[in-house]
Amino acid sequence: MSLDALLGGLKVDSYFDILKAQSISLFTKIFVAIVILFAGWLIIRYMKKVFVQIVNRGRWDEALVKLLGSVLSFVGWIVVIAAVFKVLGFTEVSLAFSGSLALIAMGLANSASSIVGDLFSGVSLIADDDFEIGKKVTAAGITGTVEAIDMRKTRIRDEKGNLYIVPNKSVDNGTITINTLAKEERQSAS
């Protein structure tokens, strides 16, 4: 049996021309995929640095900054990998990656809603002139002195020395009583 018969009547020269064209196309796709991976790595790295610099100017919790930076990197890599699969001709895999990105984003948005609520409540509490560090308050069922207010939590120390760390949303959504009389004044009044 001859080579031409094995190739189904295709001449050997035309077979090698087709193989050559397909090889060049494949190597071109692989080269473009490598360029996309490298460019994606550079872009993700730069965006993460810029994000951290911008966020560090505010009073954000370091753990939250790292978490959001990791989420940014993860999303960036999903997009880059989807682009690589698209260039290589695996359109279905690319669509699956894009779909998984949408599902992950919905999950993060749902789970991050409490964090976002705490952040907005933290901004509200920090801006509130009545609720300040050093004041005696009753908030979220706890009576004590406000020791710290950060973007996510408020720290209140009671008279026994116990430190309560309360999510800002719990403090902001509840009734806050500001104890204006000092302890000595309350004792002399009774």
Image (tube, rainbow, N blue to C red):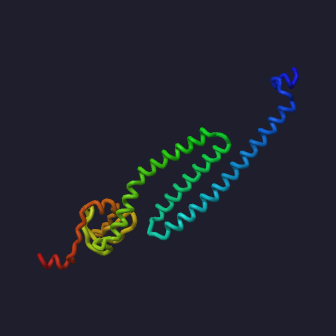
Query: Where is residue 123, by image quadrant?
Result: bottom left
- Tally the numbered discs: 0
Tell me the quadrant of the picture where the N terminus can be found. Answer: top right
The structure residue drawn at horizontal position 11% and vertical position 75%, both measured from the top left corner, is 190
Residue 32 location (% of width, % of height)? 71, 49
Instruction: Name the residue at 45% across, 51% down.
Output: 108
Q: Nearer the viewer, residue 66 or 90?
A: 90
Q: Position of residue 80 (x, y in %)?
A: 61, 50
Residue found at the far top of this picture: 1
- Figure check: 33 above or below 118: above
Which residue is painted at 67% across and 55% down in the image? 38
Horizontal arrangement in the rendering, residue 143 relative to residue 57 (left or right): left
Q: Nearer the viewer, residue 127 or 114?
A: 127
x, y percentage for residue 141?
25, 61
Which of 21 and 179 lies nearest the eye of the viewer? Answer: 21
Residue 102 location (% of width, % of height) = 50, 46
Q: Is residue 109 left or right of residue 12?
A: left
* 44 over 181 or under it: above or below: above
Residue 85 in which image quadrant: top right
